[in-house]
Amino acid sequence: MTTPALVFELFGHAALADDIARRCGVERGRLLLRRFPDEESYLRYEDEVAERDVVLVCNLARPDPHIPALLFAAATARELGARSVTLVAPYLPYMRQDHRFNCGEALTSRVFARLVCDHVDALITMDPHLHRYSALADIYTVPATRACSAPAVAEWLRAHVERPFLLGPDAESEQWVSAVARLADVPWRVSQKTRSGDREVAVAVPELASWRDRTPVILDDIISSGRTMMEAVRHVRAAGLPAPWCVAVHAVFAGEAYDALLEAGAHGIVTTDTLPHASNAIGVGAILADALLRHRR
Ligand code: R5P
């Protein structure tokens, strides 16, 4: 490492920022962030950032109220003489609008990527929702690292679930499901999903009856409204399998999604700590720290 780094957290990612800083052997910095009465953002670096590599660890679960402050933080670090600004966004939002499905729609994935790239020198994220884009470099013009949670998820699976059978709820989930299945050496299948609205999905599952002696684990990258998982849970139960574990990388959980998924028949819900949530049981700090160390080499 050349320049000493300083790790700051934004929007409630203190525990993960502490973990990453400790594992990388670098200092934590303090950033004061508050709202004026009219809700404009006030921001102040309480540690000297000049000539430092600034690392911003951001919780972007509910991105819209936070995007201006994130950009202010990155721009201010540069103005104050930071040598570099790296955004660690364990959950990268605005990846799902990756196509103009109807004329006149905003292609927000591209616009968001442009905004971020104007203000930071590098991006590190975990399991971004790459569907119609094949790589982050399709839209992110700064060096962008795609860390992968599969080793941590596979380790959790090996330690907590007897004779698992992995099911992906849609075609996109194949990338995560196949990686975890390979590492944990377990059988897997994926379903097909048709989405007709934000909360309207239909899932067509593969043949499941032959997995009745296994513990079903439904694995996806994101649980937002929870509808995708709920539909998959319904099919798993209808096929006569035991109540499934629902495992996701990013615990977005809009509204009452978490309780609704439990009520829908999930045996348990487990997520990684890319977003802070009560369901976090899989730590990814070591994987993100490793990505940061590699980036700084
Ligand atoms: C999209 O294809 C993602 O992989 C997830 O399946 C989706 O974001 C889950 O959304 P929801 O929980 O609202 O069904």
Image (spheres, grey):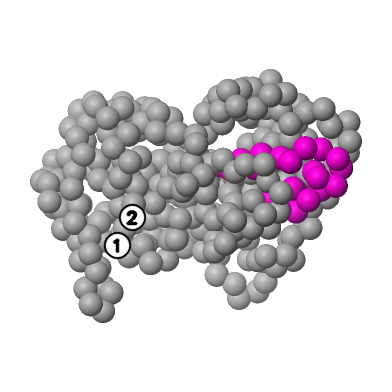
Give the residue furthest to the bottom.
38
Q: Which residues make up the magenta segment? A: 228-249
Residue 235 at least partly seen? yes
* Relative vertical location of residue 97 with respect to residue 287 in this rendering, above or below: below
Residue 159: quadrant of the picture: top right
Closer to the N terminus: mark 2 or mark 1?
Answer: 2
Q: Where is residue 198 in the image (x, y as percent from the top left)?
A: 65, 66
Q: Is mark 2 on a helix, strand or loop?
A: loop
The percent position of residue 40, horizontal first and vertical second, equals 26, 73
Vertically, is 256 above or below 274? Answer: below
Q: Is residue 136 shown left or right of residue 48?
A: right
Q: Is residue 146 above or below residue 61?
A: above
Instruction: Reply yes or no: does residue 21 show up in magenta.
Output: no
- Give amino acid for label 2: Phe
Residue found 85% across the figure and 47% down from its top: 238
The residue carrying mark 2 is: 11
Badge 1 marks a residue whose secondary structure is helix
Image quadrant in which the C terminus is located: top left
Neighbourhood count class around disc 2 (C-alpha, 10 Å): few under 14, some 14–19, many 20 upward: some
Can residue 117 be seen in this snapshot?
no
Q: Position of residue 143 (x, y in %)?
A: 40, 41
Kind of residue sitting beneath label 1: Ala
Q: Are marks 2 and 1 in contact (CB under 8 Å)?
A: yes
Q: Which residue has dot 1 on it?
A: 69
Quadrant in the rendering for residue 286: top left
235 is within the stretch colored magenta = yes
Residue at 52 percent of width and 29 percent of height: 152
Q: Left of 220 or right of it: where is 236?
A: right
